[in-house]
Amino acid sequence: MSSTTIYAFLSDEIYWEKKFVDLDKSVNKGLGYIDDILINYFDKIATISDPRSSRINTLEVGVPVNTNMKIVFDSSKLEPTNLLFQTIDNISLGKIFNIVEQISLMQKTTTSDLNDYLMANPGHFDIYVNNSVKRSSTLTTLQISYPVQSTPTTTTIKNVTVTIYDVIEFTVRINSIDTTFKLWINSEKFKLQYPLNTIKGVVFPIEPKYLIDPTPLINITKALSESSKFTFTESNAPLHNDDFSGIYPFKTTWVISSLQKTNITFGIYYKGSKPTTLQCRKYVQTVLLNLGIAPSTTWEARLPDIFVVNQFYIIPLWGHQTLRPERILYPSVININNIFGIINNFYPPFSTTFIKDNIELFLNAHDEIFLIALPDYQNDDVFSLYKQHPTYQYHSAMDSTHAYMEASTKEFNLRLNKAMSVLFGETVTNEFNNNRFYGRDFLSFTVNRIEYHIMTKSSYFDEDVIINEDGSE
């Protein structure tokens, strides 16, 4: 049985402020409204419109018959194996909107009771998959205004206060195809949480031929002149006149010679969520090789980080602390069972077996805080931090034992300590990349062709995720 997930925005006019004259787009309450920024998150816009002639669920909301609902998503992200929209009929499509309406508008009910209601009314919801409904932990309260015909000739306006979940999720089964819909109703939450993106182009920091042979740019004035001229010309190229969600400054190391290297920045144009450094790396690598001016070995010698094929996720145990009047302490003792609970919560794509086989615990010199390390399950050949850094110790560079570490481990230690100093709010620098994985923010750096992602404190404590009534993912 095939399955897929559609990440989409629910456009619903019921939430809009009704105005006959609208000079400042005040119909946008942040709910059910697609503004100019949000629409640019989609590379190829697809729309599923409500085919029903009327709604089924008034729930004292009094939804007018002509209220429009639409599910808007990026068709370029739809898995090719999913043929749902090639085979679906209007009856099944209407039932999808029955489910959307019920989940998004049903008031003052638990997720469990809502699931039972959907299962108990197959006439409207028979395509719904049992126990698949989820709702966000965050809600928005607003007032809905709608017309009521009080007499055959009189219409009055009634106002009702409703509470709407910012994000909903459910699965339907149609023609043996399971499709999960994750729908954002709150536009601001969508912009923060939408996980998909499309990279549309890259602006090099300097003309690519100079990245291979920097000899003509030894003169700093010449280097700045060539860099500025090339970058601004590229930024005005026709490709970049389109609307985008943003430009991500992807920082990487440029090896100028055996004795000199520096950080340079590529401008990555994208639609949707901010791309990860892994996505940027693969895109830039493809563009470089397609230029045909040098083989991959030459590019790898100059831009080694572009060819990274392994990465680790590092979670500082920000919540494992003891509060004292003078400071926050991070104890060097922890119950091992707590670690598995933390890692399982943060990394849903990782199987329990993979986590058990590869999880590692280590200390950092900065506040001697515990850190969890876990390799990406798609790594090429590196799955152990210990095997990669067998001489690692948590001592800082000022400690005499720091000298006993291997060269690459010293660099890892120094960069880890500096990154932790940034995350503790004690240091400000632009040498690290920012990433977002599984709805969490990370600070990233690369050493010896391995990238390390450290979870921020705010993401560690962020509970703004879709959860079930019992708190499970």
Image (tube, helix red, strand yellow):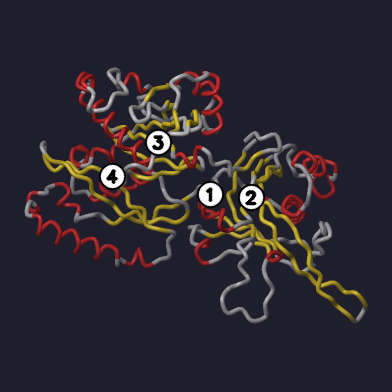
Q: Earlier in the sequence, mark 1 or mark 4?
A: 1
Tell us which disc is closer to us: 3 or 2: 3
As drawn, the label of residue 193 is 1
Relative to 16, say whether 453 is above or below.
above
Q: Earlier in the sequence, mark 1 or mark 3?
A: 1
Q: What whole-number distance in Å separates the C-alpha atoms at marks 1 and 4? A: 25 Å
Could you tell me which residue is drawn at 71 percent across and 38 percent down?
Answer: 469
User: Is there a contact, CB below 8 Å, between mark 1 and mark 4?
Assistant: no
User: Is there a contact, CB below 8 Å, between mark 4 and mark 3?
Assistant: no
Q: Which residue is mark 3?
A: 454
User: Is there a contact, CB below 8 Å, between mark 4 and mark 2?
Assistant: no
Q: What whole-number distance in Å separates the C-alpha atoms at marks 2 and 1? A: 10 Å
Could you tell me which residue is drawn at 77 percent across and 38 percent down?
Answer: 112
Instruction: Please state which amino acid type lies under the numbered disc 3.
Output: Ile
Instruction: Please state which amino acid type lies under the numbered disc 4.
Output: Glu
Q: What whole-number distance in Å separates the C-alpha atoms at marks 3 and 2? A: 27 Å
Q: Which residue is mark 4?
A: 431
Where is residue 463 drawn, in percent x and y?
Answer: 58, 41
Relative to 443, say whether 165 is above or below.
below
Where is residue 340 drawn, in percent x and y?
Answer: 53, 23
Quadrant of the drawing holding the C terminus: top right
Q: Which residue is mark 2?
A: 167
* In this rendering, position of residue 28 left or right of residue 317: right
Tell us which disc is closer to us: 1 or 4: 4
Where on the picture, by quarter, is residue 464? Answer: top right
User: Is there a contact, CB below 8 Å, between mark 2 and mark 1?
Assistant: yes
Question: Which element type, helix, strand or loop, lies under badge 4?
Answer: loop
